[in-house]
Amino acid sequence: MALANAGIRRLLVDTGEPRTWVSPRTDLVTALLGVWFGIGLMIDAWAHSNLDSELETFFTPWHAAFYSGFAAVSGWIIWQVWRNVRTGRPGLAAVPQGYLAGLVAVPAFAAFGFADMMWHTLLGIETRVDILFSPSHLGLVTSMLLIITTPLRSAWNAPDVGARPTLGRLLPALIGLAFATTLVSLFLSYGDALQWRAPHIVEAFSILNGGDAERLATTIALTNIVLLAPVLLLVRRWRLPFGSVTIMYALAVLMPGAQTAFENVPILLAVVAGGLAGDLLILWLRPSAGRRYAFWAFAGLSSFATWSLYLGFASATGGGLPDTPELWTGAPIVAGLIGLLLGALFLPNATGQPGAAGQQDAAGVTSPAGQADPVGPPVDDRA
């Protein structure tokens, strides 16, 4: 018993040894297993939205897909730690950079999963908006978010990820953050503009009585923030390679697509097209933490472009332009203004860090103004 306790203490002690990074391939596996986890949740969300009568027990095929994804990604994270323990790295030194929060979230998710099973057993299965407010579900989604964003935290300060990473190197982080966005959109489903079908959008902005116009305008504003905020986080940190925003938006539309059984494909495609517009704006404006006005312009213009395409696709496939021109012309402008405000909140002042135009780099060499495209200041994010 004493030997066992000594072994446990050795595993938990912080020796102060520097923690290491995993390989890009390991991060990619973590991200892909997170995709399994995320798709399992989408299947479960689809079942809750479309199969009310078949959700009479906790033990369903949909939960099996969801929890098997959790087992796969959590087992992989634990294995990365155990590999380091086997090489003689005890305590926190065994946890790779960026993996600590995900590791802590594994037992938390398991605990909330057990609580969810007990909740369903005692109180029944939620099938309406109450599913989004269940305490056990909120605990699950919070811990899940920490797990699937592990590749993002791993890449944040990784020594091989420079100011201008390639799309392949940044892909695990993009996947993780995109699926985190889908989690947020799931639990804000009552305000998700991506679940509206094209004819309903046209009708809502045609008839001022009844409240649909107000509801649609509100969901556009909320969904705009949910989509844009993760992109601004990345743009502030790196010069994103072309295709990054398109990939993130393409993954982000999967959850509302699953919830509506993909009956609103034109609207989902419009958002993916908005991601492509965002990538083109990055090429043109070159936004970064050191280029505040370009960052603000990107935030505003990308929002305007996305929601212009949203209303354009809706009109093209839903019966023509809405009857109230103030709504379909003004809604993208409002979205753009919200994006501009969000950009100003993310970057109120240009940062003056190594590598910025006119700043000295780590070697003491000054970069000519206009030559460098700096990213946000390094953050000591060892979780």
Image (cartoon, rainbow, N blue to C red):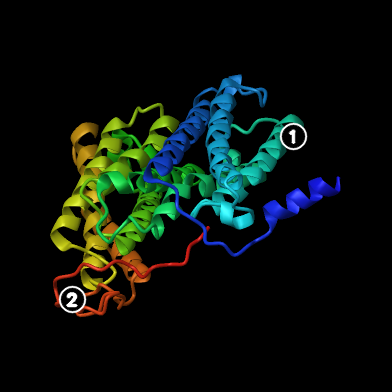
Q: Nearer the viewer, mark 2 or mark 1?
A: 2
Q: Nearer the viewer, residue 64 or 125?
A: 64
Q: Which residue is mark 1?
A: 118
Above or below, 326 relative to 62: below
Above or below, 243 relative to 225: above
Q: Nearer the viewer, residue 117 or 75?
A: 75
Q: Amino acid at mark 2?
A: Ser
Residue lying at 26% horizontally and 79% vertically, measured from the top left: 364
User: Does residue 38 appear to the left or right of 301 in the view shown?
Assistant: right
> What SS does tag 1 mark?
helix
Q: Is residue 330 visible?
A: no
* Rendering coords of residue 24 (x, y %): 37, 45
Distance of label 2 from label 1 (alpha carbons): 60 Å
Q: Which residue is mark 2?
A: 367
Q: Earlier in the sequence, mark 2 or mark 1?
A: 1
Mark 2 in CB contact with mark 1 (< 8 angstroms)? no
* Rendering coords of residue 294 (x, y %): 20, 67
> What SS does tag 2 mark?
loop
* Rendering coords of residue 248 (x, y %): 32, 45
Q: Nearer the viewer, residue 169 or 328?
A: 169
- Please tell me in which quadrant of the rendered image residue 291 appears: bottom left
Q: Residue furthest front?
A: 88
User: Does residue 150 appear to the left or right of 160 in the view shown?
Assistant: right
